[in-house]
Every structure is written in structure tokens, then in C-alpha cells.
Amino acid sequence: MTRRNQLGQALVGGLAFARYTIGHFLNQPDNPTAFALLRFEAMDEPQVDDVHRHLFYELIWVDAGQSQQAIDYQRYPVGAGSLFFISPGQVHEFEEWEPLRGGSILFTADFFLLNQPDQDKLFELSFLDNFYANPLLHPADADFRAIRQTIALLDTEYQRPDRADAVLQPLLHSLLAQIQRCVDQQPGAGRVSRQYVVQYKQFRQLIDQHFATARSVSNYADQLNLTPHHLNLICRQVTGQTAGGVIRTRVVLEAKRLLTFTDLPVSAIAAQLGYVDPSYFARLFRQQTGLSPQAFRLSGSATGMSEKYRQ
């Protein structure tokens, strides 16, 4: 039985998918650590699938070399002087092209928010949680050098046998604030208010939890203490889509994942996603992607990732 078939069986009872903790990337699956800093030059290769999901945030920085990263069917060449962000729940694939120098910082939401009175602080970071479509950032040279200096401070503290969260967490906050400043300097970045960023991310969080059973904009708006009109306004400001469009995009993304990583028939996938009529689901999928579900399953973007998953 292939891992793909095992996954398909697991999905019969719900939208399950293998997810990794930070401990898995240390090759210590039972390690409950909430923060790690790994250098590519020194780390052991993690014993995880090439294609995987995280239960934590990851920031990759590259000093030299070239790699290809993929998140949910979008591929990005990540080279020297760049930063790459991976958020919980995203389907991620790492592929090294040239020997890399650099590393990654891994942290949980709980670690970031520890002792923070403002629990929306993490949501205010617009480069996390797939807020922007592009998780790849190329800071100006001076900004990248400043970011690397903060990473060096984090690395020094992390390597200490007596390292302390009380030192690591403020340094992490400083690093992410530096990155947000770089993001805010990008063309068009300042067009969305911080409040809208937070409210949109809260909406996305609810969708991630309920997209298979709830697709009413009014229902989500009620949970956010917003009117449907206001929720639509927020979504249009952030994404250019209506709130209903954001929900449909999330449903189709999950459909793509199921078509790629399972052998479930299209009718079963439709049922998993809450559609009684498979033909209606197929029409929705085609409207969003330009392909039928079966055509997508046979396409290069799906078969390439599924083959890596089954290796």
C-alpha cells in the first residue's frame, strides 16, 4: 500500500493530512520545543516527507546557493539574499538545487504570543499566514544585512546551553518587525490597514476550520461581529475578491490537495468537501481553475507533487 493510498483511507473520516512539529525537523519527534534555529551547513537532514505540512511558522534565509520551494502548487526560486516564509497548514516542498548557506527559524504561534497582552500581534504581520500570494521576499542589500545581524544574535543565544526564551522571544519579535518594515516598503503594501489585515486573517482562520461545512458569508460575518457588507469590503481591499470568493478559493485549494495526494474518486472528494452533487462541484472547480477535477489530477502540477510524496 502506498502512502498515497494510506492517506486516502485516512481522509475518508475527515480532512486529515500528515503534519509535522518542530521536533520532527530536529529528528526528535517527541521534543515539544516551540522554537529552533537551524543552519543548513550544520543540520542533519530531517526525516520528513519531501512534501509536507507544518504546525509552526518557518522563516528561511539564504546567504548563498539556490533552492526551489513550492507552496500549494506555486514554485519559487529562492537564492542568495532572499527570505521565504512558510505558515502552518500550507503544503510545502523543499528542493535544493545548489549547496545552500543560510538556515531557517522555526517557531510556534504560542511562542510568539507568550506573555503578550495583544493576541492579535501575530496577525498584524502581513507576510505570514499566506496574506500575500508571494511568500518570497528580496530585501534591499542594506536591509538584508540588518536582518542577518538580528539572526546572528538569535543564533548566538540559541547555541548557549543556558538559552532563555526571555531572550529569544524579544529577538524574534525584533526580527519579524524588521521584515514587516521591508514588506511595507514594497509597492502597494501600505494600501491595507492593519485592522483589515487582522480581520481578514481571522476570517481565513475560521474558513480553515469550517470550509467543508460552512460556506455562508453571513455565518462567518456573525462570528467576526461584522456585517456581510463589511466583510466583503475587507476581502475586496485585501484580495480583490468577495468574501464568497475567498471561501470558494479555499475549498478549491483543498480539492487540489485531495486530487494530488489521494486516489479518492472525484465524487468522494466532492462529498468530503460538503457537496452532495458531484457535477456541481466539478463545475465550481472548472470555473476556478479552468480544468475539470480529473484533468487537474492528470496535470503536471498535480502529478509532480504526488510522485514526490510517494517516493
Image: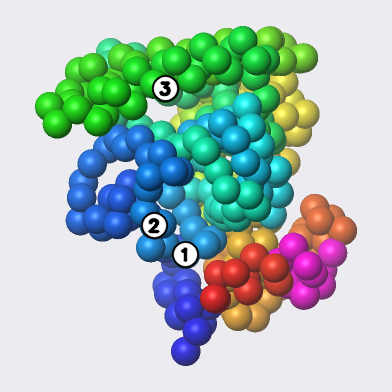
Q: Tell me where the magenta segment starts and ends, as one range.
A: 291-302
CB within 8 Å, label 3 to label 1? no
Q: Residue 151 bears which disc, if any?
A: 3
Which residue, as the protein is rendered here, is positioned at the far bottom?
Answer: 1
List x then y, in percent, for residue 9. Answer: 46, 80
74 or 294: which is nearer to us? 74
What residue appears at the point 12 percent right and 27 percent down from the top-left corner? 162
Q: Which dot, 3 or 1, sits closer to the camera?
A: 3
Residue 103 versus residue 292 in the image, above or below: above
Q: Disc count in the image?
A: 3
Tell whether 65 sits left or right of 188. Answer: left
Type of the residue with mark 2? Pro
What residue appears at the point 47 percent right and 24 percent down from the top-left corner? 123
Q: Which residue is mark 1?
A: 49
Tell whether 77 sits left or right of 60. Answer: right
List x then y, in percent, for residue 177. Answer: 48, 13
Is tag 3's residue or tag 2's residue first in the polypeptide sequence? 2
Which element is circle 2 on? Answer: loop
237 or 154: which is nearer to us? 154
Camera sees residue 229: no
Type of the residue with mark 3? Ile
What residue appears at the point 60 percent right and 53 percent down from the top-left corner? 96
Which element is circle 3 on? Answer: helix
Q: Which dot, 1 or 2, sits closer to the camera?
A: 2
**How many other residues sit within 10 Å of disc 1, few (<14), some (14-19) or many (≥20)?**
some
Residue 128 versus residue 13 in the image, above or below: above
Cα separation between marks 1 and 2? 9 Å
Cα separation between marks 3 and 1? 27 Å
Type of the residue with mark 1? Asp
